[in-house]
Image (tube, rainbow, N blue to C red):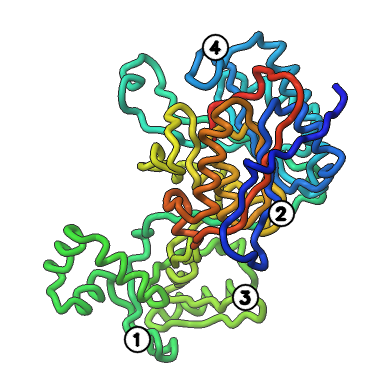
Amino acid sequence: MDPRPLIEDLARSYRAGGPEVDGELYDNRLIRGDNLPALLALESEFAGKIRCVYIDPPYNTGRAFAHYDDGVEHARWLADIRARLEVLRRLLAADGTLFVHIDDNELGYLIVLLDEVFGRANRASVVTFKQGAPTGHKAINPGCVTTSNFVLVYAKDRARWNPPRLFTARERDPRYAQFIVNRGEPHEAWRIVTLLRAFADAEGLAERAARQLARDEPARLDRFVLDHADAVVRLARPDYNAVSAAARAMIDRSKAAPGQVLRLERDDHDDFYFVRGERILFYAAKLKHIDGERVAGEPLTTIWDDLLSNNLHNEGGVAFPKGKKPEALLKRVLELSTRPGDWVLDVYAGSGTTGAVAHKLRRRWILVERGDHCDGLVAARLRAVVDGRDPSGVTAVVGWRGGGGFRYFRAEGGDSDMSSEPCP
């Protein structure tokens, strides 16, 4: 297929009112039409420039939905996906990332196809995304209840790929159950009591009453732990054979003097503290800044079960109950693969989630979607984001108040079944 030019519809292009502000993004692009002609038309300008591609193609389940039919012959589905993946790879920057969202129906075949197009060595992760709970009519079916689908992550070139280290929030770790009451004094004088005892003293209660308060209002104890994280600790027995010779010597000294807190000074890392042969671990070391809050965090894994939105049906002001993705999911995808100002591409735009989140995160974006809902759903949602009229999704977390704009184009060429999707 020969590339055809994209035609801008100036009447549908949109920007925020008022004077232009430095840093606002106006060259974002919403393209209506079949995504394969659109991709070919984009290649001359954007080859090697797209930092992140996120696509949520039809899952080929054989079912029909309100906005698209999700069932074509298997070989045709693979051929159509391959044609688009080959262009997407050329559009990606050398250190760019591809995310493909899929369920288990074509999962195995898609992994093999992606390994062929991108190279098996460039497969970075297979993420399991929890999209629901085992409730409702599906919970009565025999066998396992399906509550997840998958995000396949591929680097354009693994050797150049350098994603940031992300953390996810987690509940308070109950193993940190001790407290240094005089943390500000020299370590030789530290006195360690139970966390409950320290909490009771802070609340002016007996331990029994403090225990009941922690049960009735667990957030009170959680807040106390966060406010005193430098003093909340637990003891851990080090692997004697895995630590340095200096650490082994300190462990031996600590066992010989069980009533003392000993310190091992280190030049390039935090000092170690030992008591009774065990290392003192501080809760403060577990805290990370996540979405503007200082909370306990753990490194991002390939199990994404923390992004379920209780208000997903209202996000973006668009009703798309079958397949719309939470904005928090796209926020994670973009934070894992881009920086402000980078180009993001989604050629199965659906309800426009990718563009909405990219705009709020001040990334530049290109969306492709066919049919009337490109105007009725996607464009309407993005106009609300530009105007600052969309309070849903990640708006509050990222501090979005509106601005920027987008250009509206039409792609010439016939539609194909691969242009519709279970909308993100």
Give the label, 2 or 1, closer to the camera: 2
Residue matched to label 4 = 62
Residue matched to label 3 = 269
Q: Kindly report the distance in space between the C-alpha atoms of the residues bearing marks 2 and 1.
A: 48 Å
Which of the numbered marks, if any, corresponds to residue 342? 2
Residue matched to label 1 = 182
Q: What residue type is labelled 4?
A: Gly
Residue 33, horizontal then vertical, whole percent: 68, 28
Q: Kindly report the distance in space between the C-alpha atoms of the residues bearing marks 4 and 1.
A: 66 Å
User: Which of marks 1 and 3 precedes in the sequence?
Assistant: 1
Q: Tell me if I can see residue 116 in this picture.
A: yes
Helix, strand or loop under label 2: loop
| Neighbour tally class for label 1: few under 14, some 14-19, many 20 plus, Cα within 10 Å | few
| Neighbour tally class for label 4: few under 14, some 14-19, many 20 plus, Cα within 10 Å | few
Contact (Cβ within 8 Å) of mark 3 with mark 1: no
Looking at the image, which is closer to me, 75 or 313?
313
Helix, strand or loop under label 4: loop
Which of the numbered marks, if any, corresponds to residue 415? none
Q: What residue type is labelled 1?
A: Asn
Helix, strand or loop under label 3: loop
| Neighbour tally class for label 3: few under 14, some 14-19, many 20 plus, Cα within 10 Å | few
Q: Which amino acid does label 2 sit on?
A: Asp
Residue 53, horizontal then vertical, whole percent: 69, 40
Helix, strand or loop under label 1: loop
Q: Which amino acid does label 3 sit on?
A: His
- Residue 316 vs residue 89: left or right? left
